[in-house]
Amino acid sequence: MEILVCVKRVPDTSENEIQLNAAGTDIERDDLVYAVNEPDNYAVEEALQIVSRTGGNVTVVTVGGEEDEEVLRREMAMGAQHAVLISDDAFRESDGRGIAALFKEFVEAGHYDLILTGVQADDGCAQVGGMLAAMLDYPFASLVTAIEVVDSGTLKIAREIEGGCKEIHAIDLPCVLSIQTGINEPRYVGMRGIRQVASVPIPQLSAPDLALALAFAGKNNARVVRTDYFVPPAGKGAEILAGSREEVIEKLLDLLKTKGGLN
Amino acid sequence: MESLAHTTFWFVSGRELFLFLHLLGLACFLFILSRRLRPLLAAQRDFRFDHPLLRLGRVLEYWLGQWRHPRFRYAGAMHILIFAGFLILASHAFALLGLGISDRFATAESALYGAIRQYAATVVFLCMILAAVRRLVLRPARYPRSADAIFLLGLIALLMAADGFFEGSQAATHGNLLATFSLAWFVGKGLAAASFAHLRNIHLGAYLTHEVTFFFLLCYRPFGIQFHVETSLFSIYFAKLQRGTIKPVRWGVPEDRLDGLASFGVKQFEDFTWKHILDFYSCADCGRCAELCPANAVGRALSPRALTIKARDYVFRRYPVFGPSRDGVPLVGGLFSEDEIWSCTTCGSCEAECPLLVEYIDKIVDLRRGLVDDGKAPQSLHKPLKALESRGNPFGKMEKKRADWAQGTVPVVNGAVVRTLYFVDSITSYDDRMQSIGRAVARILGRMEENFAMLGARERDSGHDVRRFGEETLFLALRDHNTEAIRASGASRIVTADPHAFNALKHDYKDMPPVEHISQVVARAVRTGQIRLKPADGSVYTYHDPCYLGRHNGIYEDPREAMDAIPGLRRVEMERSRDRSFCCGGGGLAQFYEAKERERMGLRRVRMAAEAGANVMVTACPFCMANIEDAIKVAGLEGRMTAIDLAELVDRQMETADSGAGN
């Protein structure tokens, strides 16, 4: 099976103190460290596991600049066979539709049986997967938590729905799936792995290669424009339950039930 | 009595029979040995041929001197007796072998040696009975129920008994003198009334029994725990010389060529080094390691004894003496579970205990290297490792905030040469609680009028536990970064209060200026009167030895000396102290790994302190502090037990100019 995984490089929320810049138009990006968007990483792991069972290749693709190569290399160190960087000044500040259009044109130039995205990006809007499927006229399922290959044309998938329940669907290939975290345990990628793929050339596609998408990509074609950022006010502090051990357990259970943590 | 060699047994002469028996026994033994050598030859290289004199010294200490045995008093005393008995009886055994072949070997032995060896045989015989009673009746928890062990005890007892009958029957025939109350003496007394023909049969029968048992034992030993009789000398000679260190990824492959290796660590059995396989052979299954292992004590999946015995049985299956190889299960995920491999805190308790100097930490680290290389680092370690890669600390905190804890009181290296570099390391830099240790260290160094500074934002995690958790490439990157920053500082010595950083700088880094732990600095300062301490409160203090200060670096007395310099301080020792200290739960990345366990190690440790009658636990490691303070809460001992770092204690007790004036 040929699998394409669309990934994104995002500021690593566990390693940054996100602050607004003085103008309030963006976050302070000077001291940020980046990582591959976590759900995307689960998607790549899932693709690798499918390929290890059925054979085939995993390709990772991202839209961005030179600096975004870092996440492609990390996914290659994980085991992805191919990586492609879609990069051009003309693609900068695309909205979700623009990104989806770029991926659509890329997908149509190749042969992919399955396209995976993360369920959403840490700094994104959870749009690209669905839009891409619509543009390609492929079946689409979101929040996927399990994939089973039934035969060369069909998958059985599980989707997470409210309350931790699962729905099982059959879906025809080729299709687009957005992958929920927890679907697997992504493998660890160390420095050694990244170094081993450090000199593998990563092909770049630019505006002439994806000319059709130019009608959708870039700042001027964006229909959704970010106008402001704000930081929510700090909420109340933690609540410390008091009482005997039994009472505390009782109160905790009540809280978990009322807040939807337990059914 | 007639010569053994010339006696006729059924149709063959004794000479022919015994020559055949001996050659057959020897051939079998050599064959088995050659089969046992095969995995060693297939294994990885291991450079253990340096420092012959030092190694011989260790053979004298640990092999001939049995230095570690008395750590377990009864079993140790018994082993020393049996070992001494075997050594004494060795030349006698060879003489007996010769006797069956030719009378020329019947050299006269001195009466003194004769008496000594008769007593030696008696003592060994009695020890076998005592050992069997221990195993069958008293059953110390650390011994597995092993039919093999009882069988071996029986065989040795039989060997000694056969010798006694051989000697006794001879003495009864010729009226020789035997050592009073020796086994042979009793047999001789018992056989005094027997006829010559009877005595002759007993004599020949005893000899035959002795020889058959001797060779059977020789050939049986390589199949189980008694193989250590043959291998221990080599295991100890080739034992690791430098504690606190970790073996290179691959011996003979320099660090700058590591990227060229196809694989890291131990993934299949042949990835172990030959010495490590020799260790598996040498393990006598005595269980001392497991009894002392903190991971085992709290019910984690790890027991060092089981690790070795499982590996030994695995190599026996994979390289059998007879028949085809049964390759069996994969090493990790089959023979060992991943949780087992990650459960070790590398505290070194097992290695401090093993009488045969079997190594554990290097093997565990090599197995982890294999797992990391295959992408199988535990999920809970992914984020800390990634943060170490991008931010230089496992918490993902900003580099520029690394020096914030000092609130400007500690200068940061800025081009000017400093004498002393204070290496803070990650947890003390970023953890709210541990920052107090850093500030105490700064005040102590300040009081001593040290010219000191720290690296600040240029410091990265020492990488101590990154290496021990198998992420060698990341460790090397952290080490190289720090090495460059330390060299650029021009410091002529390094002080740290973190034993993990201390051990890394001392053993994992190269060409560093001398490194001292703050407890060493303080001990010297109180000795010279540079620091004066005011009287203690009425609390009862106990000192918890951090693994990487104590066991791995032998610093036991300096912290105690510093504590004892506080006038009136009441200090008690926990039963598990110094090189038997009980790990608090582990530091560095161990803090991020949640092993399956019945209870926390720290909880056990806090209870030990309470049992010793202490209400203040003093430690000298920020990770110990984290684990112990947690455990005090979990144990419900808040208000009755507190923990304080040695640096904090000294800082608290330092006389200010005012308080000093009163004295």
Image (cartoon, rainbow, N blue to C red):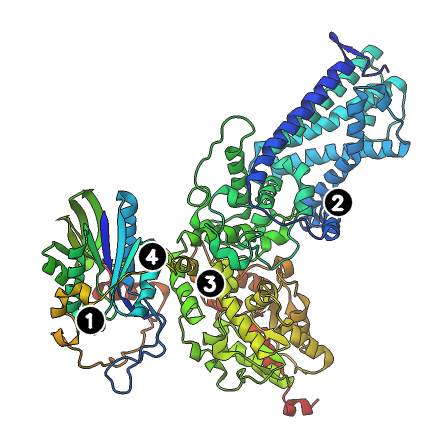
Query: Marks 3 and 4: which is nearer the front?
Result: 4
Query: Which amino acid type corresponds to the residue marked 4 in the rendered image?
Result: Met
Write down the residue under mark 1. A91
Rendered image: mark on residue B474: 3
Q: Position of residue B404 (x, y in %)?
A: 46, 82
Q: Position of residue B234 (x, y in %)?
A: 68, 43
Q: Along the horizontal axis of the image, is B265 left or right of B508?
A: left
**Cα distance between the residues tagged 2 and 3:** 42 Å
Write down the residue under mark 2. B64
Could you confirm whether marks 3 and 4 are on the same chain? Answer: no
Write down the residue under mark 4. A76
Q: In the image shown, does A190 or B348 lie closer to the viewer?
A: A190
Q: Secondary structure at mark 2?
A: helix
**Cα distance between the residues tagged 3 and 4:** 18 Å
Q: Secondary structure at mark 3?
A: helix
Q: Position of residue B630 (x, y in %)?
A: 46, 67
Of all residues, the one furthest to the front in this rendering is: A208
